[in-house]
Amino acid sequence: MTDADPPTVSVLIVDDHPVVRDGLRGMLESAPGFRVLGEAANGTEALERAAALDPDVVLMDLRMPGGPGVDAIRELTRRGARAKVLVLTTYDTDSDTLPAIEAGATGYLLKDAPRQELFTAVRAAAEGRTVLSPAVASRLVSAVRTPAAPLSAPLSAREREVLALVARGTSNRETARELFISEATVKTHLTHLYAKLGVKDRAAAVAVAYERGILG
């Protein structure tokens, strides 16, 4: 690896369909910068494999017999696992995905996403950046049956700028550079907008912002 090459991202693939696991493994192993450490067929196996292999990213299906993905995500979060979880859903109306946000998943893609989009999303997830496309977000929030609670206070112009960059998967450091502010200030803005949106993390902030029309 040269100095210019990005670090290799290690991946655990979790899906109950062998053909899907094979396809994902083939795609990732054909591209430089990715290493598939193993596979699991359900959430229970995912927890065991994640503990044994310590991957950078877990590619997680949501609906699987023998242990659903959301439960596994919640348990990985509870354990303080280092791995970031990138959910791959078959259906963009999957009502499990909003609970997955709350459970601690970093990002969401549909399984028909282009190859390059998958690669970009896996690397972004490994870096702790939110991966949530507007198309997926709009479908997710349609599953919400109750009206959204009003904002505790309107977002400031700067908070909206920070949120827009977060939605693009921009890191705190990159956001600070783009807005000509310090990383500490970015974190302060994030803390404030989380409180106003009633969320705890970046993925949830982006989802709620799409739901409320703050991002479009």
Image: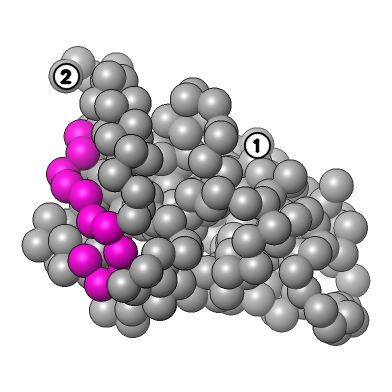
Label 1 – label 2 distance at C-alpha? 29 Å
171 left or right, relative to 146 = left
Give amino acid for label 1.
Glu
Tell which of 60 and 195 is nearer to you. Answer: 60
Q: Is residue 210 above or below residue 26?
A: below
Which residues make up the magenta segment?
A: 35-45
Coordinates of residue 58 in the picture (x, y in percent)? 32, 53
Q: Is residue 127 above or below residue 77?
A: above
The reply to whether residue 203 is in sight is: yes
The reply to whether residue 162 is in sight is: no
Quadrant position of residue 168: top right
Q: Is residue 18 above or below residue 72?
A: above
Element type where label 2 sits in the image = loop
Give amino acid for label 2.
Met
- Marks 1,2: beta carbons within 8 A: no
Characterize the local packing of mark 1: few (<14), some (14-19) or many (20 or more) Cα atoms within 10 angstroms.
Answer: few
Element type where label 1 sits in the image = helix
44 left or right, relative to 170 = left
Magenta segment: does it hold 44?
yes
Q: Is residue 33 above or below residue 96?
A: above
Tell which of 33 and 136 is nearer to you. Answer: 136
Kindly identify which numbered label has been placed on residue 1.
Answer: 2
What residue is shown at x 35% (from left), y 48% (from top)?
17
Tell which of 176 and 11 is nearer to you. Answer: 11
| Residue under numbered circle 1 | 178
Characterize the local packing of mark 2: few (<14), some (14-19) or many (20 or more) Cα atoms within 10 angstroms.
Answer: few
